[in-house]
Image (tube, rainbow, N blue to C red):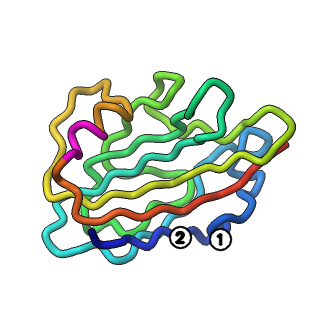
């Protein structure tokens, strides 16, 4: 499988996410760049989650059917269709861990050979199920945050 390169002008891989993009700042999404999108890609999907959340992985932001020509997601904006986060809202939920240890926040991007046909209330599990067998490439960017 090919690898996508996912970067942000706001922070480097495995570095601290600036407070601006968290619940103690503006709570907006950071800018993301996606490089290495392979030929034949029909859509991209993004899953932003916290595997260190108390009670299991917390899904912060789900986007799918992002046009393959969209190699940038701007700060405080989105492209494609927004799926439901763990709060059952189709929005970016900023990192907001309880005080204490660092949490890892993972922006995972997938290049797909299809456009996903999902209902209006799609959650991460629905997107992941629909992506099965259609992955051309994937990549991730990890940010850290604690309060």
Q: Which residue is nearer to you in this view: 103 or 82?
A: 103
The image position of residue 77, as x and y in percent, is 49, 52
Stretch in magenta: 128-132
Return the residue at label 1.
12
Residue at 29% x, 72% y is 2
The image position of residue 142, as x and y in percent, is 59, 59
Return the residue at label 2.
7
Quadrant of residue 147 in the image?
top right
Q: Earlier in the sequence, mark 2 or mark 1?
A: 2
Would residue 97 appear left or right of 7 to someone viewing this image?
A: right
Residue at 63% x, 24% y is 55
Query: What separation in Å lies between label 2 and label 1 (alpha carbons)?
Result: 7 Å
Q: CB atoms at circles 2 and 1 under 8 Å apart? A: yes
Q: State yes or no: residue 93 in magenta.
A: no
Main SS of residues in magenta: helix
Would residue 12 appear left or right of 79 to someone viewing this image?
A: right
Tell me if mark 2 has few (under 14), some (14-19) or many (20+) residues whose alpha carbon lies within 10 angstroms of its own: many
The image position of residue 56, as x and y in percent, is 58, 29
Residue at 25% x, 49% y is 65
The image position of residue 129, as x and y in percent, is 25, 36
44 w.r.t. 52: above or below: below
Would residue 5 appear left or right of 87 to someone viewing this image?
A: left
83 w.r.t. 7: above or below: above
| Helix, strand or loop for disc 1 | loop
């Amino acid at each position: 499988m090919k690898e996508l390169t996912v970067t942000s002008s706001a922070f480097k891989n495995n570095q601290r996410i600036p407070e601006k993009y968290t619940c103690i700042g503006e709570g907006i999404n950071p800018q993301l760049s996606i490089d290495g999108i392979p030929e034949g890609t029909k859509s991209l999907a993004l899953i932003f989650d916290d595997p260190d959340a108390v009670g299991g992985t917390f899904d912060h932001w789900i986007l799918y059917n992002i046009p393959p020509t969209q190699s940038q997601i701007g700060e405080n904006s989105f492209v494609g269709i927004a799926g439901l986060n763990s709060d059952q809202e189709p929005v970016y939920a900023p990192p907001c861990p309880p005080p204490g240890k660092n949490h890892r926040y993972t922006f995972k991007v997938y290049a797909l050979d299809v456009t996903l046909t999902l209902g209006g209330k799609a959650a991460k599990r629905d997107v992941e199920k629909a992506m099965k067998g259609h992955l051309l490439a994937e990549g991730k960017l990890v940010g850290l945050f604690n309060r």
